[in-house]
């Protein structure tokens, strides 16, 4: 069965010594990268549960563990040579589930404002839309565009900082969601603009 090359986000952390060693260890242990992708959803469920319960520091930890899984699945698949024909599905779909779980969970866990849940769902929708626009560009025959002020790593960075800040100021969660919403709108718009320009041959 042909092995499909996973579309990858450019990340400097792939070259970090600790990341290379960890990926090598997982690959040597025979860990399938698709299992690591599924583990990212488990981390996201835990993060969402912590957010809803107001356990902000554990939530920040699980958000970072989600990102670690996202890093390792691609490295084990590509650098570790353990990719599979279904790798593209496992690479992208769990990310969308994880975004929804964490961002919506943040909305349900925020005590302020009264429309915090709506903020969480709006942030979730826009996070999925930014990814959809990226994949849409790929479907049009273009290189997938991972750029933007609020791509996945930055969404999670904003929410991680918000979780840490929320230990002192609970309103930080809602403020973090607002930043994600505005940034996601800008990111989606910029990606659409670049896709249209490339398709029209202006760049």
Image: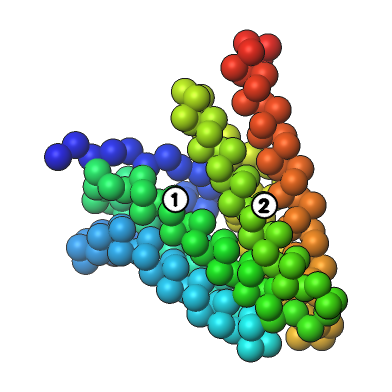
Q: Are marks 2 and 1 in contact (CB under 8 Å)?
A: no
Q: Nearer the viewer, mark 2 or mark 1?
A: 2
Q: Which residue is more in the foreground, 54 or 74? A: 54
Considering every residue shown, the one lying at the far left of the view is 1
Q: Which residue is more in the foreground, 127 or 161? A: 127
- Where is residue 72 shown, x and y percent of the image? 40, 59
Question: Which is more N-terminal, label 1 or label 2?
Answer: 1
Checking the image for residue 92, the label placed there is 1
Give the distance between the C-alpha atoms of the residues marked 2 and 1, in whole angstroms. 16 Å
Q: Residues within 10 Å of mark 2 (few under 14, many from 20)?
A: many
Residue at x 75%, y 66% (from the top left corner): 119
Q: Quadrant of residue 167?
A: bottom right
- Position of 111 relative to 122 (above/below): below
Tell me: 34 left or right of 42. left
Q: Residues within 10 Å of mark 1 (few under 14, many from 20)?
A: some
Checking the image for residue 175, the label placed there is none
Q: Which residue is more in the foreground, 141 or 77? A: 141
Q: Quadrant of residue 90?
A: bottom left
Q: Which residue is more in the foreground, 176 or 16? A: 176
- Where is residue 24 shown, x and y percent of the image? 30, 58
Residue at x 59%, y 51% (from the top left corner): 128
The residue beneath circle 2 is: 126
Residue 132 visible: yes
Residue at x 62%, y 47% (from the top left corner): 129
Residue at x 62%, y 11% (from the top left corner): 201
Q: Tag 2's secondary structure?
A: helix
- Where is residue 127 shown, x and y percent of the image? 63, 53
């Amino acid at each position: 069965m042909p092995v499909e090359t996973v579309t990858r986000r450019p990340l400097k952390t792939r070259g970090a010594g600790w990341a290379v060693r960890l990926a090598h260890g997982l690959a040597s242990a025979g860990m399938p990268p698709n299992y690591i992708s599924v583990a990212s959803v488990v981390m996201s469920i835990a993060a969402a549960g912590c957010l809803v319960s107001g356990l902000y520091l554990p939530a920040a930890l699980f958000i970072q563990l989600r990102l670690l899984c996202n890093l390792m699945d691609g490295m084990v698949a590509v650098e570790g040579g353990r990719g599979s024909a279904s790798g593209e599905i496992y690479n992208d779909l769990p990310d969308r589930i994880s975004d929804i779980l964490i961002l919506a969970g943040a909305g349900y866990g925020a005590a302020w404002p009264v429309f915090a849940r709506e903020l969480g769902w709006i942030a979730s929708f826009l996070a999925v839309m930014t990814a959809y626009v990226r994949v849409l560009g790929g479907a049009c025959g273009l290189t997938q565009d991972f750029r933007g002020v609020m791509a996945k790593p930055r969404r999670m960075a904003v929410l991680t900082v918000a979780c840490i800040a929320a230990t002192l100021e609970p309103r930080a969660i809602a403020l973090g969601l607002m930043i994600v919403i505005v940034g996601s709108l800008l990111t989606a718009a910029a990606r659409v603009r670049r896709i249209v320009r490339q398709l029209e041959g202006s760049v």
